[in-house]
């Protein structure tokens, strides 16, 4: 951190990155799928109202780490997580923590757009409904409108809220999924390669959206695209073979990384 | 780009002589042969289906017609209630000599000498013995009819019915056939006078069992089948769906669940008669439930249908994309909310199809019912599933064993009715699926 490039220093001063408090803290996180160990003592912290990008070659454990953050790994048989992950002050693997409540605080957007085969309105209102965030129809209407506006989808769908969400285009579906995640007002949004199934125009829209969402949410995004990581994130973490290689400010990461492996990966020498 | 492509493309074009013989002609010939096999297979299937339907329909359509002889019956008081004691003794009306009324009416209509006993016997043989109960019911329902003359359509006896439908070969020597020349002559007379007519046979739908074909119907059997279907639906659907959801979504994948899965698949292949034995020993011998009851039949068919429903439901649950599950779980839905809000509704068309296929299977099942005493001669409609009844396919089985010509057509007629039920159920399955699919 002491040897930052000038640009990075500027950027860091601009964002006061080091002053930004941690939202989630991962300490010695290891994940096992049966006998196979997928993550090796990862220490990675996620800063508040920051976009943190997780990059690395396929199978490096970045998605696995992402999924430990809202305990989606629980749904996989014989998957075991050790170490400690806290959200604010709460240990999320504490037996007293309710996974339902955790996932309301840490939302998730998946690689493939996966709207429910229901209407757009029902898609967005489902989360608030099961979490009891609204009572009256008017409350729901308001949440749906706000969420769709935050996801930049309102103007496109406001006249057909009761048409099926699966009838939208791929990019619209993905923004609908983001609206659905936003609707429960989470603190953190996890995105697992949210643009890998989208065309460049839809990708640009989603990236723009991520930028805007940063004001209100903490975002962790897994991406295969180095350019995307450089465009949308302020912090980048590089994984390789289940190890965290380097975590740094994005600008520094892509100009003057500390680790040789990061340099090689960014330059396209492996991956 | 185009330059590169055009300059490099000649490299991919080999001279014709150098081309390997990969048997293009043989490949196409093989494909054509395969198509021909497929067509042949379908044609064979259609042919047999056509033969089946044709046989059943051509044999069975006459079952929906019934010959009736409408006679002016004089409800004479001197026959029914000679001592005028019906006010004090209502059972008098139950035991009156009603056949005598039929005899008198016939004798009058045909103009025969009442003293000529053999001739009178031949005449009365033309009318079904069920006329007795028919007239009794009229009188009991409305005693004021006594003393008047009413035109009553009486069922013709089975053989007369067959003869009227042209099913009895009149060229056969008289002593060897069921209908004699005298009766044939009377039939002509009665037809000319408009008394003997062929009408739509409502009786086949409403009557219970009878040894006289003209008075036999599938009413009791249909009601018994209805009871059983309701029991199967009420038990097999919830149990089957609950079992599938648990096995598919909650149960840990280990040896035990593997074993359960293998056994469920095996149970689907267990011969149905074995379920009959199981029902006999458990429900009747051990639990002491009544024999011949639709309740026991329904329970046995439930056991038989469960594996079908479980397999279909599990397949339908498996077919729901995992992304839907992760979407709901990622939003903070509990596992149960995920299943009941998203997975099960999406799997519902498959579940319904499986259920209706299972029900249709159960509706046509005969063997297990034989063992629990549902092969029974049940005349009265069962008031509840606890009372003796029989089932449609069992009724078909029993009629197929009868000797009279008129039962042959009734057997086919009952098959037609059963097939219509099955077609309607399958149509219902398709319509329900459509509706559910449109909702999503």
Image (spheres, helix red, strand yellow):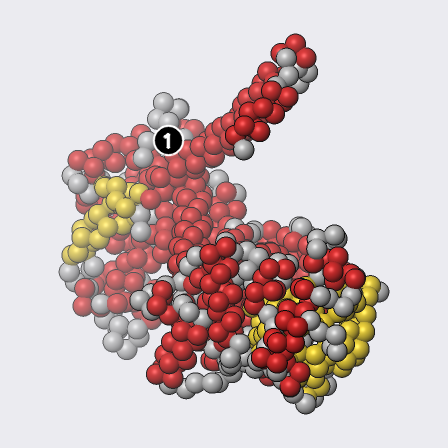
Q: Secondary structure at mark 1?
A: loop
**Residue occupying image coordinates x 61% and y 81%:** A13
User: Is B189 located above or below residue A106 in the figure?
Assistant: above
The C terminus of chain A sits in image quarter:
bottom right
User: Is B108 located above or below residue A83 in the figure?
Assistant: above
Between B351 and A155, the residue placed more toward the observer is: A155
Where residue A23 appears, as percent x and y from the top left, is 64, 83
**Hey, which quadrant is residue A123 in on the image?**
bottom left
Where residue B176 appears, as percent x and y from the top left, is 43, 28
Q: Is residue A232 visible?
A: yes
Return the chain for callout 1. Answer: B
Side of B178 relative to A81 (left or right):
left
Where residue B2 appears, as percent x and y from the top left, is 52, 30
Between A238 and B65, the residue placed more toward the observer is: A238
User: Is A53 located above or below residue B425 in the figure?
Assistant: below
Seen as rendered, the residue at the extreme front is A6
**Hey, which quadrant is residue A163 in on the image?**
bottom left
**Hey, which quadrant is residue A155 in on the image?**
bottom left
Between B214 and B305, the residue placed more toward the observer is: B305
Where residue A270 appears, as percent x and y from the top left, is 75, 53
Side of A145 relative to B323 (left or right):
left
- Return the residue at label 1: B168
């Amino acid at each position: 951190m002491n040897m930052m490039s000038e640009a990075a220093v500027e950027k860091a001063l601009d964002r006061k990155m080091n002053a930004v408090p941690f939202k989630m803290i991962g300490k010695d996180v290891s994940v096992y799928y049966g006998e196979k160990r997928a993550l090796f003592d990862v220490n990675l912290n996620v800063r508040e109202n920051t976009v943190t990008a997780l990059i690395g070659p396929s199978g490096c454990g970045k998605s696995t780490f992402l999924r430990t953050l809202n305990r989606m790994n629980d749904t996989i048989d014989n998957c075991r997580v050790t170490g400690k992950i806290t959200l604010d002050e709460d240990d999320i693997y504490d037996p007293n923590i309710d996974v339902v409540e955790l996932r309301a605080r840490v939302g998730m957007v998946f690689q493939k757009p996966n709207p429910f085969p229901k209407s757009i309105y029902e898609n967005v209102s489902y989360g608030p409904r099961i979490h009891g965030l609204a009572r009256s129809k008017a409350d729901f209407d308001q949440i749906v409108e706000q969420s769709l506006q935050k996801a930049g989808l309102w103007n496109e769908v406001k006249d057909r809220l009761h048409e099926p969400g699966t009838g939208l285009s791929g990019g619209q579906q993905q923004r609908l999924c983001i609206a659905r995640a936003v609707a429960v007002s989470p603190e953190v949004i996890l995105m697992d390669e949210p643009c890998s199934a989208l065309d460049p125009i839809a990708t640009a829209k989603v990236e723009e959206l991520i930028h805007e969402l940063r004001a209100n949410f903490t975002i962790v995004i897994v991406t295969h695209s180095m350019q995307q990581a450089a465009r949308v994130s302020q912090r980048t973490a590089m994984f390789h073979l289940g190890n965290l290689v380097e975590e740094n400010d994005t600008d520094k990461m892509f100009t003057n990384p500390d680790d040789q492996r990061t340099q090689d990966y960014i330059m396209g020498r492996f991956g | 780009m185009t330059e590169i492509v055009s300059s490099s493309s000649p490299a991919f074009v080999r001279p014709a002589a150098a081309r390997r013989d990969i048997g293009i002609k043989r490949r196409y010939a093989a494909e054509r042969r395969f198509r021909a096999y497929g067509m042949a297979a379908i044609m064979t299937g259609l042919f047999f289906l056509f033969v089946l339907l044709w046989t059943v329909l051509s044999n069975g359509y006459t079952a929906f017609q019934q010959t009736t002889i409408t006679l002016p019956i004089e409800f004479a008081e001197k026959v029914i209630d000679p001592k005028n004691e019906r006010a004090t003794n209502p059972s008098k009306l139950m035991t009156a000599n009603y056949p005598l009324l039929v005899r008198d009416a016939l004798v009058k209509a045909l103009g025969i000498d009442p003293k000529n006993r053999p001739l009178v016997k031949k005449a009365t043989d033309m009318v079904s013995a069920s006329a007795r109960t028919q007239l009794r019911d009229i009188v009991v329902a409305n005693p004021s009819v006594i003393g008047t003359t009413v035109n009553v359509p009486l069922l013709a006896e089975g053989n007369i019915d067959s003869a009227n439908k042209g099913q009895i070969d009149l060229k056969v020597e008289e002593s060897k056939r069921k209908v004699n020349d005298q009766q044939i002559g009377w039939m002509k007379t009665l037809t000319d006078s408009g008394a003997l007519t062929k009408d739509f046979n409502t009786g086949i739908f409403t009557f219970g069992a009878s040894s006289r074909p003209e008075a036999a119907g599938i009413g009791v059997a249909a009601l018994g089948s209805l009871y059983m279907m309701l029991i199967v639906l009420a038990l097999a659907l919830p149990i089957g769906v609950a079992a599938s959801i648990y096995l598919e979504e909650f149960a840990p994948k280990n040896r035990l669940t593997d074993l359960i899965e293998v056994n469920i698949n095996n149970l689907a292949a267990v011969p149905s008669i074995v379920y009959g034995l199981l029902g006999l020993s458990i429900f009747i011998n051990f639990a002491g439930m009544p024999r011949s009851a639709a309740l026991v039949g329904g329970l046995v068919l439930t056991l038989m249908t469960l594996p079908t429903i479980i397999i279909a439901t599990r397949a339908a649950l498996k077919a729901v994309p995992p992304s839907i599950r992760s979407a709901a779980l990622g939003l903070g839905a509990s596992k149960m909310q995920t299943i009941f809000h998203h997975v099960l509704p999406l799997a519902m068309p498959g579940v319904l199809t499986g259920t209706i296929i299972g029900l249709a299977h159960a509706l046509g099942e005969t063997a297990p019912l034989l063992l629990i005493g549902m092969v029974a001669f049940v005349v009265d409609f069962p008031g509840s599933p606890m009372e003796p009844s029989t089932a449609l396919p069992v009724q078909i089985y029993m009629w197929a064993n009868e000797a009279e010509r008129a039962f042959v057509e009734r057997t086919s007629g009952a098959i037609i009715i059963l097939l219509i039920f099955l077609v309607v159920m399958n149509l219902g399955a398709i319509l329900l699926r459509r509706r559910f699919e449109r909702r999503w």
